Structure formats: C-alpha cells, structure tokens
Image (cartoon, grey):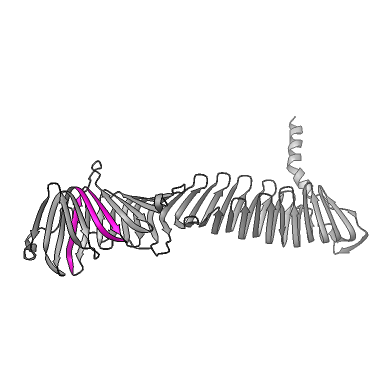
Amino acid sequence: MKTALLKILLIFIFTPLLYGQEKIELKNADQLTGKTEGEENIREATGNVHFVHGRVTVYCNSATQYIDQNRVVLRGNVRIYQDTISLFTDRATYFGNDSKAICQGGVTLKDPNATLRADDGIYMFNEAKAVFTGDVIIINPEYRITAKELTYFRNTEDSFCKGNVVVKTDSSVIKAEYLDYYRKQGKSYAREKVSIEKDSSVIVSDTLTDYANEKKSIASGNVLIKDYKSDLTAAGDYLENYEDKLFTLIKGNARLIQVDEDNDTLFIYSNILEAYREKPEYYIAKDSVNIIRGDFLSKCGIAYYYTGREEEKDVVTLNIEPVVWQKDMQMTADSIYAEILENKINKVYARKLSYIPNSQYSFLISKSDSLFEDRFDQIKGYNITMNFADDKLSIVEVDTNSNGIYYAYDNNKANGMNIISGDFMTIYFDEDQKVYRVKVTGAAKGEYAPEEKLNVVERKLPGFLLREDKPERR
C-alpha cells in the first residue's frame, strides 16, 4: 500500500515536468533539410509546416527547429492552437520545455471569452497566461480594454494593465496608468491619473476601486467628482460613491463647488461631505464647515444645502454654533436658515433653540458707518428674520425679548445712539444699509443717548461678540 501511494505521489509530482520536457514533433513540411552547428541538431522546414507538442498544434510557412533545445522559430502566417484558443502572428518562437510562445510583429489571441491583439506578446500554454505589449487591446462582449502592456489569465479572465489604460463597459469608462481588472468579480483597481465616467458624472483620483456588480466606487488621494447635471464639483481625500443609492460620501479636506455665471460661485468646505442626489438634491457638510457664496459667508459645525427646490429656491441650514456674514453684517444663533432665490440671498432666519444646552440668543451686528470703526448697530432676540431686496438688506424682524442698539446720524454727522426693547421689533434699512425706521410692539421701551453722553453709556448688548474669522476661498 505504501509503495503504491508513493508511486501515485511521484506521478503527480513529475507529470508536469515530464510534459514540459516533451519533444516538439514535426508532422509535415513540403521541404526539409538538416544541419549541425556545434553539437546542436537543426532542421529547416518549408511549406505547409505542421508541428505538434502535446495538446498544442502549430502551423506556419517556414520554421527552424532546434531539436536539442526543444525550440522552434516560426515564420509566416503562424497559427498556434490549444483546445479552444487560437494564436496568430507573423513570427514566433515556441519553447517546448516551457510550453510558451514569444510572438513578434503583431499578435492576436482568440478564445471563447475574449480577443487580444498587440504588437508583441508571450503566451504560456500550461499557465493559460498571456503577456502582451505595445498597443494592446482586449475585446469581450461586455468590456473593452486598451493599454501599453497587459497580462491576461484565461481561466479567471483577470487582466493586469499598464500604460494609458482604458476600460470601457456599458456602464462606465475607467482610465488609469495601472489597472487590475477582475472580470468575474466585477472589480477594478486603478492607480495613478485615475478617472471613471458613469452616466453624468466623472470621478478623478490617485487610486480607485470600482465594484461594477455593486455599482460602488471607492477612491482616495486628490479625489474630485464632477456632476454635469447640477454643475456641482466635490473634492476631498477619500470618496465612496453608490450609483444605485445616488449617494456620495467624501472625507478629509472635503469641498463642494457650484459654479454660477454671475460669479456667485458656491464653495462649501468641511471634513465630511455627504451628497444625496435624488430630487431634490441635498448635501450635508460636517465638522469645521465653511461656506462662501458671493458676499454670503458662514461657519458652523454642520450644514445642510438643498438645491433646486420649489421656485428654483436653494436652502442652506446651519447648526452647531453657526455664524453668518453678509458684507458688513454678522449674525449668530443656535440655528440659521438661509433661502437663496435666483442665486441671490432672499431671506435669512436665525433661531434660538431653548431645548439645547447653552442656548444663545439670536444676534445681529452691523457696522453703523464706515467713518466710525467702533460703532455697531445691534439686534438681539429669540428669533431674527432678515429680508433682502436686490441683494440688499431691507427689513429685519425680531420677536420675543427683542433688544436693539442703533446709531443716529443727521446729514451724515453722528447724532447719538438709540437703545430700544420690546416683544416684537421691525427695523427698516435704506439703500445704504442704514437704519432709518424702527417699529416696536409689546412692552416697548426706548432710550436716547446724545453724542456727548456715549462715553458713559453701555454701547454693547449682552452677548456682543464680533468675529474676525471669516472663511476664505482655498
């Protein structure tokens, strides 16, 4: 029993070796001559040449066979067959000991799954492996790959590509310098100068893994995604894109940019950005959020941006210590909600959320006059609503515990300060964004401090804090 098992084991070990050493057999030639160079026996075959090596069959116009080396040089209309594969070239060298063919001057490999063409190539019959170089193309009913170099494994249909790689399928086009394509797994791993186009979007990155079956892409390093439908561009260090769910996640130095013809381009910066592309589209920016749109600037912990809602109105919601600047005005609150109509600020709502810890009053600060650096009109209350007309502040409405300070002027000359309070307050602004009328209802109180008394009265409402950390374009 032990002897029998040993014999079987030896057969398994040495069968591949014995097969690899099998001699190339000449089956046919119209003309045959022989010679000896040193100790090497050489045969020259011409016309309808036919060789056989195991399951490999070779045809060509002429050949030089090196018998001792078990090698044959093939020339003219070279055709090599093994089972279901066919190899066509103009010139090749077939190595019997290695069961491989090195092809030159154009080569085509055909099997039931794909057709490969290139300038040169090597095919290893035992490994079912092709290594092709020079303008390589592989065509399958479901995909097409072009590259400078490509290694193809027939049994798994995996391709490893290098140099100007382009992979085209019905659903995407992937470009890269290096790409590993796992056909049966539906997976592509691309590196260097990567881009992938799907439907109306394109992703650019340093590396990318695409899962075609799951319709998912994961990219990292200098990531950028462009959505042509919405003219939105997002970027960051890392990206996950889910086609079926119409969802994109970006992490690390995340940016969202929406170009506007009137130069009111939107910029959103954060550490995390989530994009939900179902109608209406919306975006969530988290952690160290900065927003820039023309004169509208803001900072907060989390922001929601809704695009293309009813009446072409965009909406921005800011939470977690939000602050908004609009030209010389600054607004703070627990939550701020801005409406953008036809690319212009239409309304801004500031709300005090009493149910959250450390809730703060809504606070609006506006520079009173450019000639006085230390004079600021101030409005404070539970809720503040700013109304804009032609991109200028026109009316401010305040409700619940309203307080205000505004400076008076007479013919552009400073004329004291007004201190007002009440339940509800409406402030009207002129074309120069200066207060010209105030209406207070409910427990209204008012006090006037003349110019000469300003140095002895409190000129700031409780909670006054002028921020200088406006966001900047990066």
Residue toward you, 170 or 22: 170
Name the residue: 29% across, 53% down: 348
Q: Main secondary structure of the magenta part?
A: strand
Q: Considering only vertical position in the picture, is 466 above or below 334? A: below
68 and 212: which is toward the camera: 212
Compared across the picture, whether 2 is left or right of 407 comes to right
Question: Which residue: 35% across, 62% down?
Answer: 294
Whether 184 is drawn above or below 88: the answer is above
- Looking at the figure, which quarter contains the N terminus? top right
Residue at x 42% of width, y 52% of height: 308
Mark yes or no: residue 182 visible: yes
Queried whether the magenta region covers residue 465, the answer comes back as: no
Residue 32 position in % (x across, y down): 92, 60
Stretch of the chain drawn in magenta:
371-399
* 386 in magenta: yes
Task: Tell whether 392 sits left or right of 196.
Answer: left
Q: How many marks?
A: 0
The answer to whether residue 70 of the structure is visible from this angle is no
Q: x, y percentage for residue 293?
A: 36, 60
